[in-house]
Image (spheres, grey):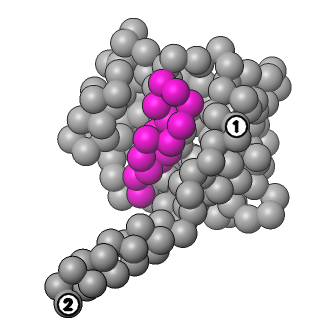
Amino acid sequence: MKKFILIGLTVFIFFFKNSVMANYDKVFYDFEIKSISGKIINFNEYKNKVVLIVNTASYCGFTKQYEELQELWDKYKSKGLIVLGVPSNSFNQEKKSNSEVKEFCEVNFNINFPLSNITEVKGKKAHELFKWAENNHGKSAIPKWNFHKILINKEGKIEDTFSSFTKPMSKKIINKIEDIL
């Protein structure tokens, strides 16, 4: 009887642990996005690097996280970390134009890590990168709010995701980044 229960639990855990099985027909490096200044950011240029993708917003309670994102970028960029800010109005807290966002980030936070243009990050209109993340990592990859974080490993696959509440310089994020750099 114990053997039957153990087998049943194993099967249950295997099939229901995560409703999405990562198939990775594509990896992160197969995508691109338009930068805040209108140029294309080809993610293939980030091959063999670790990338932290963060959907950002100018009018959010988490906006101060820009400071720690810049600090993270300054500390680890020479070791192969890319911090990629993706301004989004998916939660109705972003400025109206890319130029306003760019100026806001530079003036208030001295941001010099890559920023995309204002991009949808959830729902049917989400950028293909965020649809790919959901398809391969499940619901935890869907931004629930601004400053949601998706960590991409050197193979171009999702390593982990972090909620808006997890600060960029938290031990949780730092330890994960250092493990995969």
Dot 2 amino acid type: Met
Dot 1 amino acid type: Lys
Of the numbered discs 1 and 2, the one sitting upstream in the chain is 2
Query: Where residue 32 appears, x then y in whole percent?
Result: 75, 30
Position of 63 compared to 34: left or right?
Answer: left
Residue at mark 1 to residue at mark 2: CA–CA distance: 44 Å
Q: Answer above or below: position of 160 versus 11.
A: above
The magenta stretch spans which residues?
A: 149-163
* Residue at screen point 35% across, 21% down: 181
Q: Residues within 10 Å of mark 1 (few under 14, many from 20)?
A: few
Marking on residue 26 = 1
**Image quarter (top left, top right, bottom left or bottom right) of the N terminus:** bottom left
Q: Main secondary structure of the magenta part?
A: strand
Position of 16 compared to 146: left or right?
Answer: left
Of the two numbered discs 1 and 2 in the rendering, the one whose residue sits closer to the viewer:
2
Secondary element under disc 1, as helix, strand or loop, is loop
Which residue corresponds to mark 2?
1
